[in-house]
């Protein structure tokens, strides 16, 4: 503010009026303190790496969803009143349907630009959740969730879960056969919860499913409640990114105490602005070309019809898969039926998500690492974490595959039962194999890094020595590359405290402590890392006679 005052005074003293822009800025600064804010904020440094764009993809697709969603609210009627269709889509003339379905047809066929906006809204939702998954994997595999960013991981995780629910309530709104089938499944899920399930279902649907209320209720949840919470979380998420400063990959001059990169203004602002239009452009182009959710093909929802053509959006395919692979077990007790075939998948779904949500806390407990981390790991240098992430993705992939068991069967002429058995077995075996294979691949890559450090990069040039031997010429790495490949830490596992203390008194070691030490060994034990090349080894080899 003081700078602003000086400028005005100086301009005033010289009898000259400050330019209009400066006067507006002064006025605003006097009330909002924007100079101080901008001074700190606009010069904030952001490190550069392509994978840091993924969070931006989430942000921009979220904005696109909100913009297009507002347009849709102008024409969508969230009502289940029955009407007869007389719009321009001829095959549905005279069909009885809910007002919600009719207004969706109107948006698609009679509202100017309606179909495109509807498609952009839907495609942006798919990209949004895909973006979140990939962004989350970037954060996971590089260890960006470690202290101090655990809370931001939880904020992000909540965004992923809420985004999925918002998508589900969204595609339930048109009240077509797809949405009806999905809501029917959700009702079945809720009802499978012991004791309270039936009551929750009655409460949600205002009586027996489907009732006459669910569209209007889902509507409030879809356009107001969930996006409102999400908006708050996104703002909190970004404030935390700003406050913690962004992480960076290892490199010369980069430490846990600095950030090397470009300033937010003007470099990042320009890049981010351009990138927003790129994301918008790509989503709009896809929406202009590829049909999504053609509600007119399936027709309005009727509780007595179930369409096998109705596939959920991709992010719910995994939960659908869990139901499809589960045997239809049921137990009856004192006149009540517990539908385990639905309830167990519901629990598994919750457990798989919860483990991922609390992973940062599990890892810091196991490794005993309570330090701040601003330098990212390369996934290969944290083999157990990487293997765990790949196992989780495999589980997710198998369940997603199970969600389309009918499609695999029809497209590849297989028996649906064989496909189901294949995914049932893969559900248990797949993640274990993925875990083992990933850990081995990581070790292989670490070995390759060490090799590169000691012997240089394979140049592909073959040379024949005077005595006839053929050798491949290796190019030495630059100092920067050497630094980057050897900058990572190689922590040691936790050790059990001696069971007998210095006074010869036996102390009891708790079971949890033993488990922790065992897990810590699995993270950091001898066979989990290839010792980095030492300076001595390097000198010995490079001072040789270029034998390689
Ligand atoms: C609406 C959804 C989301 C938006 C708009 C969003 C946006 C962003 C942006 C712009 C960044 C900085 C750039 C980058 O690192 O990509 C970021 C960082 C981060 N995000 Fe997200 N994100 C979302 C969802 C998630 C999810 C699902 C997770 C994890 C479960 C997550 C965890 C994080 C963490 C831990 C950071 C800090 C990373 C670092 O400093 O390296 N975010 N987010
Ligand atoms: C993360 C946030 C959101 C997601 C993932 C999402 C997703 C969806 C999806 C998948 C549909 C079905 C579209 C279709 O018919 O094919 C939908 C419908 C709709 N959404 Fe959203 N939406 C979100 C936020 C919003 C917001 C903020 C608004 C309004 C301000 C909104 C308004 C609507 C309306 C009116 C419909 C019904 C119209 C129709 O189905 O064509 N949405 N949403």
Image (cartoon, rainbow, N blue to C red):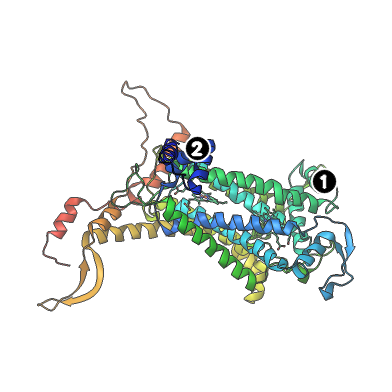
Which mark's residue is nearer the viewer, 1 or 2? Answer: 2
- Quadrant of res 548: bottom left
Foreground: 251 or 322? Answer: 251
Across and down, in percent, residue 484 comes to 30, 54
- Quadrant of res 497: top left
Q: What's the mark number on residue 476?
A: none
Across and down, in percent, residue 82 comes to 89, 60
- From this viewpoint, which residue is outermost toward the top? 503
Across and down, in percent, residue 105 comes to 79, 67
Question: Taking 445 as reference, is 415 above or below it?
Answer: below
Q: Specify which label sits upstream in the sequence, 1 or 2.
A: 2
In the displayed structure, does residue 455 sit left or right of residue 289? left
Q: Mark 2 points at which residue?
A: 33
Foreground: 378 or 126? Answer: 126
Q: What element carries label 1?
A: helix
Q: Name the residue under label 1.
A: 202
Answer few, some or many: residues within 10 Å of disc 1's Cα (few below 14, many 20 plus, some between 14 and 19): some
The Cα atoms of the two marked residues, 1 and 2, are separated by 52 Å
For the point 24% across and 58% down, the residue is: 453
In the displayed structure, does residue 387 sit left or right of residue 28? left
């Amino acid at each position: 503010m003081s700078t602003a005052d000086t400028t005005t005074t100086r301009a005033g003293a010289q009898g000259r009026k400050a330019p209009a822009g400066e006067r507006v800025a002064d006025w605003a600064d006097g009330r909002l303190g924007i100079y101080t804010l901008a001074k700190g904020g606009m010069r904030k440094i952001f490190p550069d790496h392509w994978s840091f764009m993924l969070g931006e993809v989430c942000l921009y697709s979220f904005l696109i969803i909100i913009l297009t969603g507002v347009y849709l609210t102008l024409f969508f009627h969230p009502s289940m009143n029955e009407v007869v269709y007389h719009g321009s889509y001829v095959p549905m003339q005279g069909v009885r349907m809910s007002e919600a379905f009719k207004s969706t047809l109107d948006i698609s066929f009679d509202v100017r630009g309606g179909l495109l906006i509807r498609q952009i809204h839907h495609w942006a939702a798919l990209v949004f959740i895909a973006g979140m998954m990939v962004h989350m994997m970037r954060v996971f595999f590089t260890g960006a969730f470690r202290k101090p960013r655990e809370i931001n991981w939880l904020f992000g995780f909540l965004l992923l879960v809420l985004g999925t629910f918002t998508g589900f309530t969204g595609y339930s709104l048109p009240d077509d056969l797809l949405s009806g089938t999905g809501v029917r499944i959700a009702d079945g899920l809720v009802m499978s919860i012991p004791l309270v399930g039936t009551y929750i279902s009655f409460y949600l649907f205002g009586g027996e499913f489907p009732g006459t209320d669910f569209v209007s209720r889902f509507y409030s949840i879809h356009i107001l409640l969930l996006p409102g919470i999400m908006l708050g979380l996104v703002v909190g998420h970004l404030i935390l990114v700003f406050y913690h400063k962004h992480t960076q990959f290892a490199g010369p001059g980069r430490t846990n105490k600095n950030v090397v990169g470009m300033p937010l203004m003007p470099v990042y602002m320009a890049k981010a602005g351009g990138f927003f239009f790129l994301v918008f452009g790509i989503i709009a182009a896809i929406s202009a070309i590829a049909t999504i959710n053609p509600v007119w093909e399936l027709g309005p929802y009727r509780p007595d019809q179930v369409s096998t053509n109705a596939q959920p959006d991709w992010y719910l395919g995994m939960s659908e898969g869990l139901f499809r692979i589960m045997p239809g077990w049921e137990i009856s007790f004192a006149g009540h039926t517990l539908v385990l075939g639905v309830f167990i998948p519901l629990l598994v779904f919750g457990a798989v998500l919860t483990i991922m949500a609390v992973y940062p806390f599990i890892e810091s407990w196991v490794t005993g690492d309570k330090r701040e981390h601003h330098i990212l790991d390369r996934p290969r240098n944290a083999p157990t974490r990487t293997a765990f992430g790949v196992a989780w993705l495999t589980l997710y992939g198998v369940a997603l595959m199970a969600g389309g068991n009918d499609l695999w069967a029809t497209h590849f002429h297989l028996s649906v039962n064989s496909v189901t058995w294949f995914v049932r077995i893969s559900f248990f075996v797949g993640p274990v194999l993925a875990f083992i294979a990933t850990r081995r691949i990581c070790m292989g890559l670490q070995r390759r890094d060490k090799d590169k450090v000691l012997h240089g990069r394979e140049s592909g040039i073959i040379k024949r020595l005077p005595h006839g031997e053929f050798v491949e010429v290796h190019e030495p790495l630059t100092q920067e590359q050497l630094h980057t490949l050897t900058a990572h830490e190689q922590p040691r596992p936790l050790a059990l405290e001696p069971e007998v203390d210095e006074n010869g008194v036996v102390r009891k070691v708790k079971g949890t402590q033993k488990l922790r030490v065992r897990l810590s060994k699995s993270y950091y034990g001898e066979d989990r890392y290839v010792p980095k090349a030492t300076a001595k080894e390097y000198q010995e080899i490079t001072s040789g006679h270029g034998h390689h």
